Image (tube, helix red, strand yellow):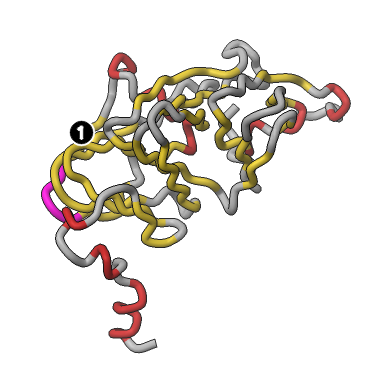
Amino acid sequence: MQLEQFIDANGPDSEATGSDSDASGFQKENNRLLKIPVDGLVTVKVGTMVAYTGDLTFTGKSSAEGGLTGIVKDAVTDEGTPVMEAEGSGSLYLADQGKKVQVLSLDADESISVNGTDVLAFEEQVDYEIGTIGSLSGAAAGGLTNVYLTGPGDVAISTHGDPLVMSPPVTTDPDATVAWSSNLSPSIGTNKLIEIGQQSGESMQMEFTGENGFVVVQPYEEGGNM
């Protein structure tokens, strides 16, 4: 491939080549790269910024009292990967370790609960609440930190591979569970039948009951989430 062909084939979408104010909302440059036209403020996962244009400033959140650090907190090790706020005017490009980007547009009062590790970014007007599934004192299961996001606004999550959306009742591996609808309240259970004398992630399970809603899983076990 000639150099000019490479540049043309891999440059930003033509719609994005104008001024940064020409478009709004989260946009996928490709399956693994998210573009956010910023005109104000957006909250993003630390370590995911790969480039930006325009005039943007970044402020990290180091205090749990700020309500943000716990978003991607590991419940067992008590180590958190904080998020940051990008503020100003420009275009922000995000990627998370080669994971695929999924953009969800939430209507007013529409909600979704997302595994904290898989939250990539959300718009300023999106309300959020951090919760924990399971017992923090459980040596094997620990707890799963999730973020309850309510629209209106765009939310970006990341998945290892293509996600699968399932209907309850369903039982999932916590390390492969990405998100679920707001009407579901999963519980952590233990399947004694698959305890085989050694540590097995599949022995800990998330149980979703009910007849309505959805659960999003990925073909990959994050490992260390629980």
Q: Residue sitting at 49 percent across and 53 percent down? A: 100
Residue 214, by quadrant, is: top right
Q: Secondary structure at mark 1?
A: strand
| Quadrant of the image occupied by residue 27 | bottom left
Q: Is residue 44 above or below residue 5?
A: above
Please, what is the dominant secondary structure of the magenta stretch? strand
**Residue 200 in sight from this viewpoint:** no
Name the one closer to the observer, 45 or 107. Answer: 107
In-image side of 10 versus 24 (left or right): right
Residue 57 relative to residue 148: left or right = left
**Could you tell me the amino acid type at mark 1?**
Thr
> Can you identify the residue that label 1 sits on?
59
Span colored in magenta: 53-57
In this image, 140 relative to 225: left or right? right
- Image position, residue 153 (x, y; %): 34, 37
- Report if residue 195 lies within the magenta region: no
Name the residue rendered at 27%, 70% in the picture: 14
In the picture provided, is 217 more to the left or to the right than 50?
right
Residue at (35%, 72%) from the top-left corner? 10
Q: Is residue 28 visible?
A: yes
Residue 213 x %, y %: 62, 31
